[in-house]
Amino acid sequence: MRWSDGFIAVDWGTTNRRAYAIGPGGARLGEMEDDLGILSVPKGGFPEAVAAIRDRLGYLPMLLAGMIGSNRGWIEAPYVPCPAGADELARAIHWVEPERLGIVPGVSWTEHEQADVMRGEEVQLFGAVASNMVGPVATVCHPGTHNKWVRLEGGRILGFRTVMTGEIFNLLREHSILADLLAEPARPGDSFAAGVQRGFAENDLIADLFSVRARALLGKEEGVEAASYTSGLLIGADLAIGLRFAWHGEIVIMGRPELTELYAAALALARRETRVVDGEQAFVAGAIHLAERLQ
Amino acid sequence: MRWSDGFIAVDWGTTNRRAYAIGPGGARLGEMEDDLGILSVPKGGFPEAVAAIRDRLGYLPMLLAGMIGSNRGWIEAPYVPCPAGADELARAIHWVEPERLGIVPGVSWTEHEQADVMRGEEVQLFGAVASNMVGPVATVCHPGTHNKWVRLEGGRILGFRTVMTGEIFNLLREHSILADLLAEPARPGDSFAAGVQRGFAENDLIADLFSVRARALLGKEEGVEAASYTSGLLIGADLAIGLRFAWHGEIVIMGRPELTELYAAALALARRETRVVDGEQAFVAGAIHLAERLQ
C-alpha cells in the first residue's frame, strides 16, 4: 500500500486530537475528533490509542503531528532547526512502524539568546503554502494558547516567535485578582479596540492589566467590557512584538475562527491588511504535502 | 484616654495581619502577627477578630490599615484621591467606634483612562516621609504581590502606578507551562541580571517568557537559573514602566527585604542609585504620624 492510496493524518494536541482519513487525490474519506489529547493518554497507552483511530478510520499508514512528538507525548521527535521546509520535515519523521506510522517533528529557532519551538503549526504552515492559501513570502500569525509569529520565505520557515497571549489571558481569568472581572467571553467591539490601541502603543502591559481592576473599584468602567478590554491589551502587546519581529510580506492569520476573528480585528486597528486562513484545511493540505514526499 | 497615651496600629492584609501597640513617644509596647488576613475572617467575624487583638495588646484606641478597608474587608473606606497627604488621609478615616476604632482609607489616582488604587502602602509612605526615611520629593518603589511606583512631592502622593509583577510571577510558577522550571527561589546573580537587562531594554515580555521554556527544551539553559532569569525579565519590564512613570527625585525602595534586595539589584543594573527602607518601620512611623492628627 502506498501513501497516495490513502493515509490517516492526526493533529494530536495537549488536550484533544483530530484525525482525518485522506484518500487518492486528497479526498477526505472520514474524520474524527475527541478529547484524548496527550495528557489524557495513560503511560504506555499510545499503541492502543493509535489502534482505536485505525479501527475507526481504516488500517492505513499514519502521520501523527503536534504534541504527540513532544517530551510529554509518545516518542520525542527532535525539532528540525530553522530554516525549515517540508523536505527537511519529511526527512526527519520519526518512524514508529517503518514507513507505516510516523511522528512528524516540530521546528526550532535560535538566535543569540533567543530560542523558540513549535509543534503542529509547521504542518499547517507548509500546507497553506502548498495549497496557495499563503504566498511563499509572508508573515503568518497563528493564534492559540500561544500565538506564533512566523517568517516564511520561499515557502520555508525562516524564524518565529511565540507569544504567551492566550495562556496569560487564561491565567488571569482563572487564578488572578482580575478573575471575577473576566468571566464574559472576549469579543471584538469598542472595549476590545480600546485595549488593543493601548496595548499596541504603550509598553505598560503588566501595569495596564492592574488598571482593569482599579477602574472597576473606582466605578470608572463606564460600559467597558473588562474581558474584551483585557484581551485587547494582551493582543495589542502581542501585535507590537509580532510586527517588530516579522513584518514583511503579506500578513496571514491562521487558526480557529474565534481567535482569528479577534486578531483580524486587532490587526485592522493597527492598519495592517490581513487574510484569514482556516487552520484545519491547512493541516490536511500539509499532511498531504508531506505524504507526497514519502512515496 | 488620648491617642498619645497609647494606641494599636494594625496592618491588615489579604493573607496576614500585623499589630503594634504604641506607647507615649512612639515606644513599641508590644506586637503580634498571625495569618488572620481578611480572607480568613468569617463573615461578621471582624468585631471578634479586633477584640482578640485588644485582649492581647491592651484595650487601646485602634487604627486599622490595609485591605481591611477594601470591599473584601470589614467596612469599605472609600479611597482618598491624589494628590493626597497625611492630613487628607486622617480626615477620611472611617470611624467604627467614634474616635476609638478607625479604618484608614486607601488612595486612588486617575488620569485620563488610567486608574490606580493602593491600600496600606500609603501609611508606610507618609511614615517614611515623617521620619525622614524618604525625602519629600522622591520616587518610591514598593514591591509586593503588586509593585507600586509612587511619585512623592511635598511629602504627598501625586500619583502612582501598580505593576502586577509579583502576581504574574506567582501565576507562572503555580499554573503555567513554565511551572516546573520555576520551582527554585529567584535570587540576584548572573541569571537574574540577564533577565533584568533583557526585560528592561526590550518590550517583548510575553514572548520572552516563552523562550524560557524553549531554551530548556532545546537544552540551551547553559547554567541559567530559570526562576531567577524569569523574575529578572518581569522586574526589568517593571522598572521600564516605573522609571518612565516616576523618574524624579531620589529612588527609594520600600518593603520586605527579600523583595527589596531583588529590586535594588535590578535598579543598580539600570544604573540608578537607590536607598532601601524597611516597610515595617515605615508603617509604625506612619501610624504614629496619623495618630498625632487625631488628638
Image (tube, coloured by chain):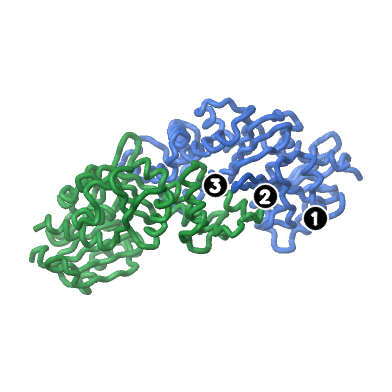
Chain colours: A blue, B green
Number of residues whose C-alpha sits closer than 10 Å to that of mark 2, classed few (under 14), some (14–19) or many (20 or more): many
Under tag 2, what secondary structure?
A: loop
Instruction: Decide if residue A191 is in sight here.
Output: no
Tell which tag, 3 or 1, sits nearer the viewer.
3
Tell which tag, 1 or 2, sits nearer the viewer.
2
The answer to which image quadrant residue A3 occupies is top right
At 35% from the left and 43% from the top, the residue drawn is A216
Q: Chain of mark 2?
A: A
Under tag 1, what secondary structure?
A: helix
Q: Which mark is residue A51?
A: 1
A91 vs B44: above or below: above
Circle 2 sits on which residue? Answer: A13
B197 vs B42: above or below: above
Circle 3 sits on which residue? Answer: B208
Give x and y (percent) for residue A124: 71, 39
Q: Callout 2, which amino acid?
A: Gly
Q: Are marks 1 and 2 in contact (CB under 8 Å)?
A: no
Of all residues, the one furthest to the bottom in this rendering is B56
